[in-house]
Amino acid sequence: MYRIDSVRANDGSNEALVICENVSFLITVRDLEILDIKENDLIDEDTYADLCSAKERLACIKKAFDHLSYGDLSKRQLRDKLRKKYPLQLCEDVADLLEERGYIDDERLAQRYAETFYEFKKMGIGKIREQLFRRGISRESIDNALAKYEDEDQRDRIREYLENKYDSARLSDEKYRRKVYSGLIRAGFSCGDVADVLRNFESEYD
């Protein structure tokens, strides 16, 4: 059996400090209520294990907020960062909790990234899709974020990207044209649209 030395809820926070056998346990007030322990109580092995788990859970939550303080993360990104220090199931539970409370939102994050990449970095849709996927955003959220761009004619954007990045006067050179073609594909534009834009450029310089 273990004796609870003291229990103190921290004013102005959702945390409680429990001292058990001279060992400190910082846990949430909610977990304190669930454990239903008071000063001078004797607790068994199972309750002591639950107290240890509650301490680890709060530490994981605090670590999650620490990661989020440096910038928004997708749910998968946050979970993967937490896994470096905490068990997988705990990381998933904490990520679920923060998602439920609105601290992480993959739909909102995907929309913001998509707009930045499309409007300011001028990426093609394929490249944007790749970038969002690499950030751990689900395919459904990616599809929703890109839906408003899918029906837009991309050829003017390709032409603008080409003129900013390449020397259009050299497109008559077959080797250079292949280089440009490959670069535009890597930028996320479709093969058909790229080929169409390059044909139009070629006809202008004939």
Image: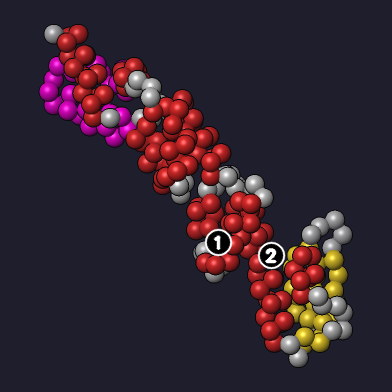
Residue at the image position 13 percent from the left and 20 percent from the top: 173
Q: How is the image coloured?
A: secondary structure
Residue at the disc numbered 2: 58
Left or right, residue 107 beside residue 39: left
Closest to the observer, 72 or 46: 46
Label 1 SS: helix
Q: Which mark is residue 201?
A: none
Residue at the image position 50 percent from the left and 53 percent from the top: 76
**Is residue 183 in view?**
no
Label 2 SS: helix
Residue at the disc numbered 1: 92
69 versus 87 height, above or below = above
Q: Quadrant of residue 143?
A: top left
> Which one is closest to the eye, mark 1 or mark 2?
1
Is disc 2 surrounded by few (<14), some (14 to 19) or many (20+) residues within 10 Å? some
* Residue 180 image offset from top left, x and y in percent: 23, 26
Over which residues does the magenta segment extend?
Answer: 162-189
Disc 1 residue type (three-letter): Glu
